[in-house]
Every structure is written in C-alpha cells, then in structure tokens.
Amino acid sequence: MEFTGKIIAILQPKGGVSKATGNEWKAQEFVIENHDQYPRKMCFEVFGAEKIDKFNIQMGEELTVSFDIDSNQWQDRWFNRIRAWKVERVGAGAPMAPGAPVPPPAPSATPAFTPGDVKDDLPF
C-alpha cells in the first residue's frame, strides 16, 4: 500500500533491547498528511536505525510511503502498526539511497505527548 503527502510531524526516536534476542532496536514515527479535499493524516513507523538513516525524512517533505499494516495483541487488546518499508521523494522517481544529497535538517514538531510523560508499559 502507498500513501502520498507532506510530513507534518517527526516524533522522537524510541529504542531498547529485545527481550527475545538481546539485540538493540530503534524505531521512529512520522505523521504524513495527504492533499485530498478532506486531508487525512497517517502516523507510520520506520523500524531500524539503518532505515531511519537511509530514509532521512525531514519536516515538510513531500513523500510517497510504501507500508504494511500489522496488529499486535497485548492484554486482550489489539494495536495496529503501520510500518514503512520504502520512502520516495515526490518527483524524485527513485527511493532515497545512501550517499544521496541531504538537505539541512528542519526543526521537528514537538509531539503532544512524549514517552517520559506517562509510564509506557506496552511490550512493543
């Protein structure tokens, strides 16, 4: 599936150590808004430090995000996760590759809630 729009928020990266394998992990969420008559927003996740660096998503960029949707169950509740696996700059015609020119970083939007505000006890 794909979604095209403008990046309107960049949330703080999250990270930790996997209980199952002991490997470190890193994820970051971004919010994109399309340009329909009634604009829709979607929060998607980029998982893995190498993908976060490779995609180098900046505030205000026009992107096409290819993603998968998955759900996780925790304590009799279900949570959806939208994970990006490819990001393309609109009009660029090709996905971002390592070594591509990088625009200067734009200030990121402050999320309405930060992980330190509330005890986060979700396992994912």
Image: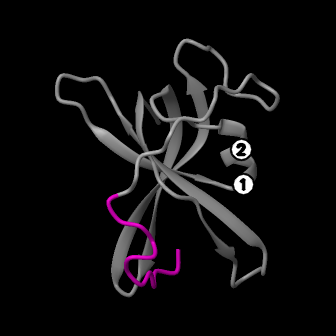
Residue 117, position in %: x, y?
38, 76
Residue 116 sits inside the magenta stretch: yes
Q: Secondary structure at mark 1?
A: helix
Give the residue displayed 45% in from the left and 29% down from the top.
60
Q: How is the image coloured?
A: one colour
Q: Secondary structure at mark 2?
A: helix
Relative horizontal placement of residue 66, taking residue 114 as reference (left or right): right
Looking at the image, which is closer to me, 55 or 110? 110
- Over which residues does the magenta segment extend? 112-124
Residue 45, position in %: x, y?
52, 52
Residue found farthest to the right? 99
Residue 23, position in %: x, y?
78, 74
Relative horizontal placement of residue 101, taking residue 64 as reference (left or right): right
Q: Are marks 2 and 1 in contact (CB under 8 Å)?
A: yes
Please tell me whether residue 34 is drawn above or below residue 69 in the rendered image.
Answer: above
Circle 2 residues within 10 Å: few <14, some 14–19, many ≥20: few
Give the residue displayed 65% in from the left and 37% down from the top.
55
Residue 113 sits inside the magenta stretch: yes
Circle 1 residues within 10 Å: few <14, some 14–19, many ≥20: some
Q: Which mark is residue 67?
A: none
Q: Main secondary structure of the magenta part?
A: loop
Residue 112, position in %: x, y?
32, 59
Q: Give the amino acid type for the residue marked by disc 1 in the picture.
A: Ala
Please tell me whether residue 12 is drawn above or below residue 94 in the rendered image.
Answer: below
Circle 1 residue: 49
Circle 2 residue: 53
Please tell me whether residue 75 is drawn above or below residue 83 in the rendered image.
Answer: below
Q: Give the amino acid type for the residue marked by disc 2 in the picture.
A: Asp
Looking at the image, which is closer to me, 84 or 99? 99
Relative horizontal placement of residue 76, taking residue 25 as reference (left or right): left
Looking at the image, which is closer to me, 47 or 101? 101
Report how far apart the C-alphas of labels 2 and 1 lie in the structure: 6 Å
